[in-house]
């Protein structure tokens, strides 16, 4: 088993470092009763032995591929001593997301427990996306909760001497040269095709290094209702999410000049014993968002064709990955917008059915679970350079479908309340009943349909 970073993982880490942005995944559990802290401690112990038990060691060569190594220490478990009202749970989750994580120096993840003053408890697990993707994290968490340990013996940090590391990384660079040559050819063609598109991109209107807070919202839908609506609309659970993404893009003005929506759908490519952090590819579709809430046939057909096409014609952006270690830091920073898909891209990521153990961090079923994608510390300059962000992440857990949304649209109101209102409008379009309730009272957390009243 090689510990050299996969080209996609190398790109993800390199671009994030150049842009100064850390993409996080946050798993959230809520118990309406007391939690077994000893069970959580066991869960935490098992997490320290799976795919999360690693960090990245930089190559000594400026153009070398980085490597996975064992961490210097293990993150501790945080158990908050002073309970807080359940109504403050979302604020506490934001605080957890602001705790610095570092895939290179560590810690790469953090687990915390918050007892509620009015009964019950909440848990947060934040993880650097450089360590793992959503599907991989779901499996790692489920394995840890079930006690299914799969320890991986990564080399110790600094275990290679200076000359050994230089020699080995140089050999790896030579092995990469054929792929680099193909990437140069692909880059020339890609640049030609992007010239016209670049002319239509809006100018960067803000180069401020001020931090911005992206808007977030999480909803819960009964799984049977979700499937029923998908069937009625001639779609699937996956295409229903893509349809919602398309309608939300229309709602916030994130569409092409002709009004089309361009959902990007991550596709899981993780195999057994796969140690890649981000084992995915993307398929992009272009659809009419206006009719999405009436008939999902177009989105279903477009997704099917895109999946078939991706097997024969891989995403050209993937062909460029071998070039990334050769790019100067400033160039990496400037091309982030190209990699993320531009100003109309909307991500529609579906974890699908998850392992039951995912919902059992203390050994028993939590009442609620959701996974969120976050960008703490992102600046205005990055958001304007990339054209903002709009992403939906969904999965089925314990009889519910969760949908978490992340958004920032330059020049628009980017509050959580506004995003909830936009989601509420989209849900009404699809005749779906949903709630933002984490198990609190309705006075604390009203139904989504009441948010725009």
Image (spheres, rainbow, N blue to C red):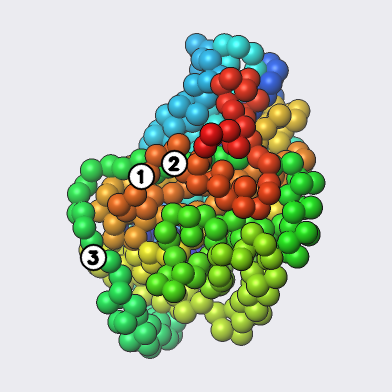
The residue shown at (25%, 53%) is: 381
Residue 394 locus on image (x, y percent):
62, 49
Marks 2 and 1 close (CB-CB < 8 Å): yes
Quadrant housing residue 306: bottom right
Is 360 located above or below residue 294 in the figure? above
Residue under label 1: 413
Closer to the camera in the image, 395 or 215: 215
Residue 110 locus on image (x, y percent):
50, 34
Residue 211 locus on image (x, y percent):
28, 42
Residue under label 2: 418
Name the N-terminal-most of marks 3 and 1: 3
Closer to the camera in the image, 286 or 136: 286
Quadrant housing residue 310: bottom right
Residue under label 3: 203
Left or right: 389 in relation to 29: left
Left or right: 234 in relation to 23: right
Closer to the camera in the image, 24 or 234: 234
């Amino acid at each position: 088993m090689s510990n050299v970073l996969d080209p996609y993982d190398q790109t993800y880490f390199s671009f994030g470092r150049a842009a100064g942005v850390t993409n996080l995944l946050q798993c959230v559990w809520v118990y309406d009763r007391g939690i077994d802290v000893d069970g959580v401690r066991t869960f935490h112990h098992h997490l320290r032995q799976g795919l999360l038990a690693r960090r990245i060691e930089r190559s000594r060569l400026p153009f070398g591929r980085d490597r996975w190594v064992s961490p210097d220490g293990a993150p501790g478990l945080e158990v908050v001593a002073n309970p807080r009202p359940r109504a403050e749970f979302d604020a506490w989750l934001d605080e957890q997301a602001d705790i610095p994580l570092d895939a290179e120096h560590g810690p790469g993840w953090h687990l915390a427990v918050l007892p509620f003053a009015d009964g019950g408890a909440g848990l947060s697990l934040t993880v650097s996306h450089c360590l793992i993707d959503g599907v991989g994290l779901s499996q790692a968490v489920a394995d840890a909760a079930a006690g299914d340990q799969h320890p991986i013996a990564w080399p110790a940090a600094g275990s290679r001497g200076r000359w050994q590391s230089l020699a080995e990384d140089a050999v790896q660079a030579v092995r990469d040269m054929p792929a680099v040559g193909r990437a140069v050819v692909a880059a020339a063609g890609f640049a030609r095709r992007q010239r016209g598109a670049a002319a239509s991109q809006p100018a960067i209107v803000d180069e401020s290094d001020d931090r911005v807070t992206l808007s977030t919202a999480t909803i819960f839908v009964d799984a049977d209702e979700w499937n029923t609506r998908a069937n009625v609309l001639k779609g699937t659970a996956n295409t229903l999410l893509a349809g919602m993404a398309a309608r939300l893009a229309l709602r916030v003005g994130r569409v092409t000049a002709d009004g089309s929506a361009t959902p990007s759908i991550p596709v899981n490519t993780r195999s057994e014993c796969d140690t890649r952090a981000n084992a995915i590819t993307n398929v992009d579709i272009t659809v009419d968002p206006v009719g999405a809430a009436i008939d999902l046939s177009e989105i279903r057909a477009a997704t099917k064709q895109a999946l078939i096409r991706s097997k024969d014609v891989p995403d050209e952006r993937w062909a460029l990955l071998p070039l990334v270690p050769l790019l100067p830091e400033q160039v990496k920073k400037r091309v982030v917008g190209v990699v993320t898909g531009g100003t109309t891209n909307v991500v529609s990521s579906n974890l699908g059915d998850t392992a039951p153990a995912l919902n059992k961090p203390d050994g028993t079923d939590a009442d609620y679970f959701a996974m969120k994608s976050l960008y703490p510390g992102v600046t205005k300059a990055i958001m304007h350079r990339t054209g903002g962000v709009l992403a939906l992440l969904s999965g089925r857990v314990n009889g519910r479908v969760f949908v978490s949304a992340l958004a920032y649209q330059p020049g628009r109101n980017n509050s959580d309340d506004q995003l909830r209102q936009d989601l509420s409008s989209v849900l009404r379009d699809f005749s779906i009943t949903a709630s933002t309730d984490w198990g609190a009272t309705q006075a604390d957390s009203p139904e989504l349909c009441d948010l725009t009243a």
